[in-house]
Image (spheres, rainbow, N blue to C red):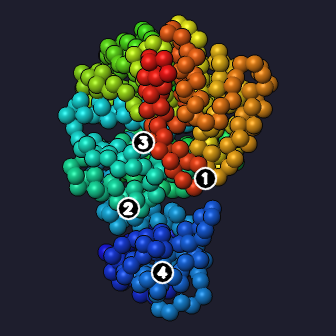
Amino acid sequence: MQLARLIRSLDVLDSRGAMDLDITDISYHSHRVKEGTLFVAIPGTKQDGHQFIEEVITRGAGAVIVEQMPPRLGDIPLVVVKDARRALAQVSAEFFSHPSREITLVGITGTNGKTTTSYLIESIIKAAGKEVGVIGTINYRMRGKEQPAPTTTPQSYDLQQLLREMVAAGMEYVVMEVSSHALDQDRVRGCHFDVGVFTNISPEHLDYHEDMDKYFAAKKRLFHEFLPESEKAPWAILNLDDPLLGDLPKELPPARQMTYGLDQGAVRAPKREISLTGIRAALSTPVGTIEIGTSLIGEYNLYNILAATAVGISLGIPSEAIRQGIKDLSLVPGRMERIGDGNPWVLVDYAHKPEALEKSIMEVKKLAAGKVFVVFGCGGDRDRSKRAPMGRIGVKWADLAIITSDNPRTEDPLKIIEEIEQGAREVSPHRYLVIPDRREAIKKAIALAGEQDCVLITGKGHETYQIIGEERLPFDDREEARQALANRGTGQ
């Protein structure tokens, strides 16, 4: 594809060199550059792509997009833009011929619930007999094929490439989790959405966004900027019960908006029953009552079901397919995933933020007949401000909290635990244990629990590794819980 065609949608500040050359690929990684590649120099938090311009020229780069015109470097074509990340998204969409125009694209943002909601929507679409791909936290998948997800939402080039692959594989729909980082960094620019979902919002990633105002502003970009730029007529699906969503429902066109809530909104669940074995509800919707049943548990999963139902209705999917799709989804990996037969109840959940931890414990307390034991920690090299609040929440709501190691990364796990303990001690010095070894912490919780009790293991969910230093060591909370239950049964 000619460079001139690739850059036609950019706001070019300056350029030099021939614009009629053929570009064979695009890259934002210098080591992936080969003959004929367009290199986009992105300023990052650790490295700046502008530092590698000479290197990419020696590798055969055909042209370079920059934010600052470098010293004269031969005859290589250069394009200067104000925002290289935005430019990368625009040229990537053009390079892959705008694959989102050829599919029905659903984007889900929010602090919690994105993954489960994406699984529910996927199941509903499959129940309608349609082909669907998913891009999200756990993996990227289509037609039974899965690949690991390095990030929730890929960088714009990788995203457009993946969307093109999904189109080529015959996907009619794609469901995508859209992170705040992706929105802030323009990764989804050039995506033509059919539906955007906002599940909820609470403090997260403040080490990156600095404060809640900036975090919320990043999330709202999906609705204020990227949905309006879609060439389609997109729907906005909004949670009316989240007080922090503020006036967002009033800010968007009502004609293409659908709200949901437990007792308010276009999609709601006035009749509902939630237990440790699942959810039963009669959903009131614009297309009539939909009776649903699922083995998913917890009130917040009912919210995810309401969001997915609203998406299904907005896409014109029949009520029976919505009902069947919700029924068919038996579990979401590491999201309130039940382990064993319920003696005691053991649940593995991804909750790794203060509000998510509080919701998980509170939900289990409402449903469990006995005591609630919680095992949790905090990740290293991540937002330190949430550690003391996590300690306060764990000790406040659980009958016994066991503070342990999560993914310490390059931090000292004992130092992380000390920071968690600062919050725990404020509540009670007598209602928690410290067991730094995560395997031993899980064993201890399950050994202490009675038959009517519930053990909630949080923080890592679906992850099959523990990051210690720079190493990813095999570790799966679910497998550790199964082993601990087996040992409990044999008296070990």
Q: Do the numbered discs 2 and 3 sit on residues whose CB atoms are within 8 Å?
A: no
Mark identifier at residue 72: none
Cα separation between marks 1 and 3: 22 Å
Instruction: Assign a secondary structure to mark 3.
Output: loop
Cα separation between marks 1 and 4: 31 Å
Mark identifier at residue 56: 4
Residue picked out by circle 2: 93
Instruction: Assign a secondary structure to mark 2.
Output: helix
Badge 4 amino acid? Val
Q: Nearer the viewer, mark 1 or mark 4?
A: 1
Name which of mark 1 and mark 4 comes first in the sequence. 4
Q: Do the numbered discs 1 and 3 sit on residues whose CB atoms are within 8 Å?
A: no
**Is 275 situated above or below 44?**
above
Query: Label 2 neighbourhood size at 10 Å, few (<14), some (14-19), many (20+)?
Result: many
Badge 2 amino acid? Ala
Name which of mark 2 and mark 3 comes first in the sequence. 2
Name which of mark 2 and mark 4 comes first in the sequence. 4
Residue picked out by circle 1: 469
Cα separation between marks 2 and 4: 22 Å
Cα separation between marks 3 and 4: 33 Å
Badge 3 amino acid? Ile
Of 377 and 1, nearer the camera is 377
User: In the current view of this chain or complex, which residue is farthest to the bottom?
Assistant: 74
Cα separation between marks 2 and 3: 24 Å
